[in-house]
Image: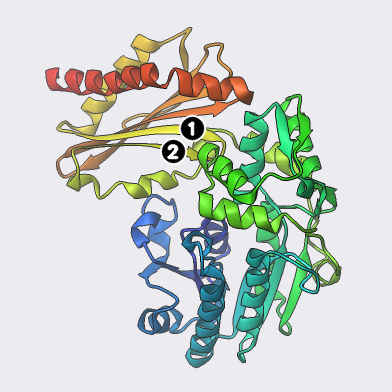
């Protein structure tokens, strides 16, 4: 067991959610800092880390989080704040660097953005670079990794590409779509972040990227080819950033404010200008973008998706019914959670009866864990892939039952299918919940 305590900030974020289990698997002791710790309850590793509530702008919570820490990962961004987030990020980095020095932290590892600061760049990328500079102004050693598009399910930039390509058979292309990026697989991001724990001599900023230097249009074309879509492009040089960000926010999991910041960042090339990272970490073999896309599509399965939406549901003993709709990691998701006043075995018996009633040829059993999980896969000819999942969990009031519908749209037809038939499907799926509860009441 490694005796060094590692703090991960931004613990509810995309990268942190994938980094923390890898740190644990390597035997590290991990502390996670989050503004909303309840958002971590659904993570598989929740019980294996020390979770603290805090804000990097709050001196008291920051001091508590950094106490006894050897290395900290700085994985914080504030794009969702909207106007003023760039100034806030720099101030936060200054405070964090000072607090880390006062706490005796030995090493800060930071993931930033890839851009040439000597060229005109967007406020978002400039803020990422200035955040790294602010962290290095203290006396704590800082390893900064600067990355372009991160390729992997759940990555904000990848989900923008995914949903845009799935939705539009002809993609509107402003001029910046001809700019170049050097995408890097999320697996390689994690490789670098972990490698820095063992090889950390001297503060430095390192450009990291995959082997491909391609345009943003080529990124979309590659995804379409791997997915099996035909994809055309319509040149529209003057699409306003706000209009494009609004469309992305409406049709993808990326919120408008974050989409606006990221779209502005696409106005310039984002490529590696120094191979220092490859020389320092020769053991890391960058994955090409097409392979990263294929791997992401292989993970298009309910059991391979982080159930982060469950964080919106309060403690199971505090509700009687809750429902929500999400877009996440390539899926449209309909989530419904209710309390059933029956034992888990009784509820699972009702679920088995429901699964039998649905049965072939409509659904087949994908995964079954008695008294815990039932996952059915749709066998209907629909423009996408669909699953119906039931999970049960013991509670002081009986059993918490969650029913989740997963639908991965394939092309424009998939979007039309989901939205056009949504009212009918929701009535049907809500009826499933009622039938399960009714069956439990008879047993």
Q: Which residue is mark 1?
A: 332
- Residue 436, percent across and down? 24, 21
* Separation (CA) of disc 2 from disc 1: 6 Å
Q: Is residue 122 above or below residue 315?
A: below
Q: Nearer the viewer, residue 238 or 378?
A: 238
- Residue 115, percent across and down? 76, 66
- Disc 2 + disc 1, Cβ < 8 Å: yes
Q: Which quadrant holds the C terminus?
A: top left
Counting residues from the N terminus, which is met first, the one under dot 2 or under dot 1? 2
- Residue 291, percent across and down? 77, 41
Q: Viewed as shown, does residue 440 lie left or right of 194?
A: left
Q: Is residue 164 above or below residue 230?
A: below
Q: Nearer the viewer, residue 157 or 1?
A: 157
User: Which residue appears at 37% of the width and 20% of the height?
Assistant: 423
Helix, strand or loop at mark 2 = strand
Quarter location, residue 60: bottom left
User: Which residue appears at 78% of the width and 35% of the height?
Assistant: 221
Does the image show residue 212? Answer: no
Q: Is residue 124 above or below residue 187?
A: below
- Residue 287, percent across and down? 78, 50
Q: Nearer the viewer, residue 158 or 7?
A: 158
Q: Which residue is mark 2?
A: 326
Classify mark 2: residues with Cα within 10 Å, few (<14), some (14-19) or many (20+).
Answer: some
Helix, strand or loop at mark 1 = strand
Q: Is residue 155 above or below residue 73?
A: above
């Amino acid at each position: 067991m490694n005796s060094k305590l590692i703090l991960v900030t931004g613990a509810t974020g995309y990268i942190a959610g994938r980094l923390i289990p890898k740190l644990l698997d390597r035997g590290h002791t991990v502390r996670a800092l989050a503004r909303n710790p309840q958002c971590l309850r659904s993570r598989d590793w929740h019980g294996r880390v020390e979770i603290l509530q805090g804000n990097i702008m709050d001196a008291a919570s920051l001091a508590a989080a950094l106490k006894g820490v050897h290395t900290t990962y700085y994985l914080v961004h504030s794009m969702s704040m909207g106007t003023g987030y760039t100034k806030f990020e720099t101030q936060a980095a200054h405070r964090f660097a000072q607090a880390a020095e006062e706490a005796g932290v030995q090493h800060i590892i930071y993931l930033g953005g890839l851009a040439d600061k000597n060229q005109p760049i967007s406020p978002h990328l400039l803020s990422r670079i200035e955040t790294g500079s602010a962290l290095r102004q203290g006396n704590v050693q800082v390893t900064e990794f600067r990355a372009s598009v991160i390729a992997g399910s759940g990555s904000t930039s990848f989900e923008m590409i995914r949903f845009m390509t799935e939705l539009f058979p002809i993609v509107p292309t402003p001029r910046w779509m001809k700019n170049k990026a050097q995408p890097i697989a999320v697996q390689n991001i994690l490789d670098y972040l972990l490698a820095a724990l063992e090889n950390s001599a001297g503060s430095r900023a390192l450009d990291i990227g995959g082997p491909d230097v391609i345009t943003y249009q080529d990124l979309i074309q590659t995804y379409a080819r791997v997915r099996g879509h035909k994809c055309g492009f319509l040149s529209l040089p003057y699409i306003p950033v706000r209009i494009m960000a609004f469309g992305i926010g409406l049709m993808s999991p990326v919120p408008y404010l974050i989409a606006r910041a990221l779209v502005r960042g696409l106005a310039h090339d984002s490529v590696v200008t120094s191979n220092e990272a490859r020389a320092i970490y020769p053991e890391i073999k960058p994955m090409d973008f097409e392979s990263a896309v294929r791997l992401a599509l292989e993970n298009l399965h309910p059991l391979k998706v982080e159930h982060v939406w469950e964080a919106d549901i309060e403690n199971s003993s505090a509700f009687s019914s809750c429902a929500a709709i999400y877009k996440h990691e390539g899926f449209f998701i309909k989530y419904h959670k209710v309390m059933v006043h029956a034992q888990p075995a009784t509820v699972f018996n009702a679920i088995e009866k429901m699964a039998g009633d649905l049965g072939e040829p409509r659904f087949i059993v994908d995964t079954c864990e008695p008294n815990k999980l039932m996952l059915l896969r749709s066998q209907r000819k629909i423009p996408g892939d669909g699953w119906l999942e039931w999970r049960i969990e013991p509670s002081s009031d009986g059993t918490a039952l969650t029913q989740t519908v997963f639908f991965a749209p394939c092309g424009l037809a998939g979007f039309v299918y989901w939205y056009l038939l949504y009212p009918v499907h929701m009535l049907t799926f809500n009826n499933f919940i009622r039938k399960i509860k009714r069956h439990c009441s008879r047993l």
